[in-house]
Image: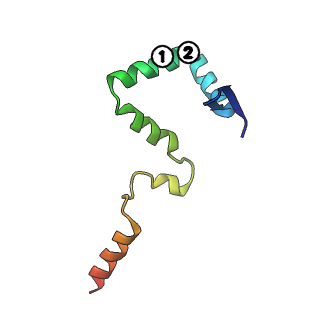
């Protein structure tokens, strides 16, 4: 994975930047404008960060990706306990 290091703790994935550049070019926006809009949106609605993180980490194209958001976040121990309660 190629990375682009701007400063010490400011690192980007090069492929993501290239894909973003194309999308921004089609919308006649610059990278600086996009980041500025992102920060303004976060100020107005901080919950956007969680929503964006979910979308960014969502797997696509695979069978397992179709299950994202469909399966609960139960702990394995809780599932095991429930199973044993059902059997008893």
The residue sitting at 36% across, 22% down in the picture is 43
Q: Which residue is mark 2?
A: 32
Q: Residues within 10 Å of mark 1 (few under 14, many from 20)?
A: few
Of residues 73 and 7, the one nearer the viewer is: 7
Against 36, is 56 above or below? below
Label 1 close to label 2 by CB (< 8 Å): yes
Q: Position of residue 31 (x, y in %)?
A: 58, 18
Against 77, is 60 above or below? above
Give the alpha-carbon distance from disc 1 to disc 2, as whole Å: 6 Å
Q: How many marks?
A: 2
Against 86, is 13 above or below? above
| Residue at the outermost front position | 8
Q: Residues within 10 Å of mark 2 (few under 14, many from 20)?
A: few
**Which color mode does the image show?**
rainbow
Q: Position of residue 41 (x, y in %)?
A: 39, 22
Say left or right for 10 vs 33: right
Residue 25 image-quadrant placement: top right
* Tag 2 secondary structure: helix
Q: Quadrant of the C terminus?
A: bottom left
Q: Position of residue 67 (x, y in %)?
A: 45, 55
The residue sitting at 39% across, 55% down in the picture is 70
Say left or right for 59 vs 43: right
Q: Quadrant of the N terminus?
A: top right
| Residue at the outermost right position | 2
Q: Position of residue 14 (x, y in %)?
A: 69, 31
The residue sitting at 32% across, 76% down in the picture is 81
Tell me the tag on residue 36: 1
Tell me the tag on residue 58: none
* Tag 1 secondary structure: helix
Say left or right for 59 vs 83: right
The residue sitting at 45% across, 18% down in the picture is 37
């Amino acid at each position: 994975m190629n990375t682009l290091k701007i400063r010490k703790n400011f690192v980007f994935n090069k492929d993501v930047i290239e894909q973003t550049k194309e999308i921004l070019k089609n919308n006649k926006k610059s990278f600086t404008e996009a980041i500025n809009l992102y920060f303004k949106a976060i100020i107005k609605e901080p919950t956007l960060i969680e929503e964006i993180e979910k979308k960014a980490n969502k797997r696509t194209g695979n069978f397992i990706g179709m299950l994202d958001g469909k399966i609960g976040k139960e702990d394995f121990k809780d599932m095991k306990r429930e199973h044993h309660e059902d059997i008893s």
